[in-house]
Amino acid sequence: MDTRTETRWASDRRRAPVVVLAVVALIAALFATALPPAPAAAAVATTGWSLELSEELELSVETAAGWEDASVLDDVDFTEYPGSLYSIARSLNVDDAWNAGYSGLGIQVAVIDTGVAPVEGMLHSGKVINGPDLSFESQNPEMEYLDSYGHGTHLAGIIAGKASDVWDNYTHQSKDKFLGIAPDAEIVNVKVGSHDGAVDVSQVIAAIDWVVQHQYSTGMNIRVLHLAYGTDSLQPYEIDPLAQAVEKAWQAGIVVVVAAGNDGNAAPLRNPAYDPYVIAVGSAQYGDTNVSSNGLVQYDRVSDFSNCGVGRTVDLVAPGKSITSLRVPGSYADDNHPEARVGTHYMLGSGTSQAAAVVSGAVAVLLQRNESLSPDDVKKLLTDNASPMSGVSSTCQGAGVVDLAFVAKGKKIRVSGSTQNHAESDGSGLLELSRGSDHLQMDGVVLAGEQDIMGSPWIGFNEIVETCAKEGNGKDAVTVCDDEQVPADTLWDGGDWNGTSWSGTSWSGTSWSGTSWSGTSWSGTSWSGTSWSGLSWSGKTWTGLSWSGLSWSGTSWSGTSWSGSNWSGLRWD
């Protein structure tokens, strides 16, 4: 077993008291594998930053979420392995939807994560569109948009991956070629996490806000938002700022799919999965004997790592245990978990992140069938048509395992009574409480309180406007002006968010240019592009990944080689 901490990408791990170490001991992983006991938390380094994390708990190999030892597949045709996307697509009747002509074509899925790398499986023209890079790595031009950890690409592959030599007739090629659940959907890459996953909740809120504002920008049709992120918020969803952000996306017509968390079956859902409007997804898996002679998988249990929820429980489950998807050679996950590699192009991983990715792909397929469906409609259709697992508590499986058999049927899809009437979040709570127990820190100074990563005061989705009124009469009349806080639909104004420049003002439909972070400080220490002393670009290289002459989603990699981006000096174990 290896020892590490992790950020909240896969919403992993039970909580314990936080202890900040004076020096960096361990680097975060986005979702943990088997974790031996540790006496205290570690501060996680990220290019001069670190993240306060809680102490690890011991998890068995069976219950753990994270990267897995793929040596068990050495003597197995992994395309027929139950955790392959080929097996998953057949077992969830996704291939029937493909045969009926529904593969996510025309639907874009925003993936707010650690970026997406241009690896085999994501190279079709227009497959990936880069939104803004709001991560701390955006200050390094060589790392903009790219997945230096390996988590975001793994999920993007599950959602919409497609091998370069596949064009149509998916069902007959899917055994030998890599295909995600919605192979014709497009990924909108909104990077917020850096190579060790460090991210503040304010960055995630900014990313969600950006997706909502650019849902239908030139060439865009964002109908799904995938979020494998969660905090242990210390306030109810009705006032939580992150919950309000996902509700804004939902109300804008974007289906928000969120990982439930990997803290164990007894744990509550993480934020924002605990918001009842969104689709909260847990992880299902198969038993040792539950693979039929025709290769179809019979899912019969909820993964031990999967959060079930308390009060608010998961809406449904999807395969999340031991899933093969795309590998990013030279990434932190790849370098530190070579045992998880499956062949040349894939890695083996588990988590509710992966399960939620299956559902995000399923949503894209469904929306191609009927793009007029509202998010409430989609949620009701998926839960009404899920396949319940016998003998499993509804608390842990929700409506059951996602099943797309209904999409392939010729009759018109009808839905009624789908409108949700939960209390809405007003976001009036504290940003600090939304962070829960995880905090960024820089040079020993913790980012806490009501401020975002730029040090700008947080007042929620509001703006300050000056209102003036005349008081008195005649020559004694005076004009009195006061600042008033009023609701705002968005905190973006060109490249400014929450009153400070986060990104450039040029949105071309394929790239976000002009990143400007300079002159900003929240700890009294400027991180204006030169203070990232934690980065050492000498050592292990992104070997063999030279994208010269290759055009990826409108961003030309001509003349650029990843071999200049080197990783060293930081360890995962």
Image (tube, rainbow, N blue to C red):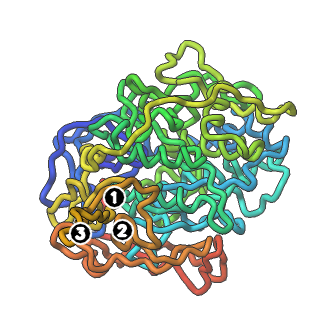
Q: Name the residue furthest front.
A: 474
Depth check, mark 3 against mark 2: the one in front is 3
Q: Tell me which residue sits at (55%, 65%) in the image.
A: 117
Is 488 in front, or is 350? Answer: 488
The residue at which mark 1 appears reads as 198
| Type of amino acid under label 3 | Gly
| Type of amino acid under label 2 | Phe
Depth check, mark 3 against mark 1: the one in front is 3
Q: Name the residue furthest right.
A: 410
Q: Secondary structure at mark 1?
A: loop
Whether residue 529 is situated above or below residue 426 in the rendered picture: below
Q: Position of residue 76 (x, y in %)?
A: 64, 41
Is 247 in front, or is 514? Answer: 247
The residue at which mark 2 appears reads as 136
**C-alpha distance separating marks 3 and 2:** 57 Å
Q: Position of residue 176 (x, y in %)?
A: 75, 50
Q: Position of residue 248 (x, y in %)?
A: 49, 48
Residues at marks 2 and 1 touching, judged by CB atoms closer than 8 Å: yes
Q: Secondary structure at mark 3?
A: helix
| Type of amino acid under label 1 | Ala
Q: Earlier in the sequence, mark 3 or mark 1?
A: 1
Is 133 left or right of 110, judged from the image as shown? left
Q: Position of residue 187 (x, y in %)?
A: 61, 58
Quadrant of the rendering where the N terminus is positioned:
top left
Q: Earlier in the sequence, mark 3 or mark 2?
A: 2
User: Which labelled disc corresponds to residue 474?
Assistant: 3
Quarter of the view holding residue 566: bottom left
- Residue 545 in sight: yes
Q: Tell me which residue sits at (33%, 63%) in the image.
A: 465
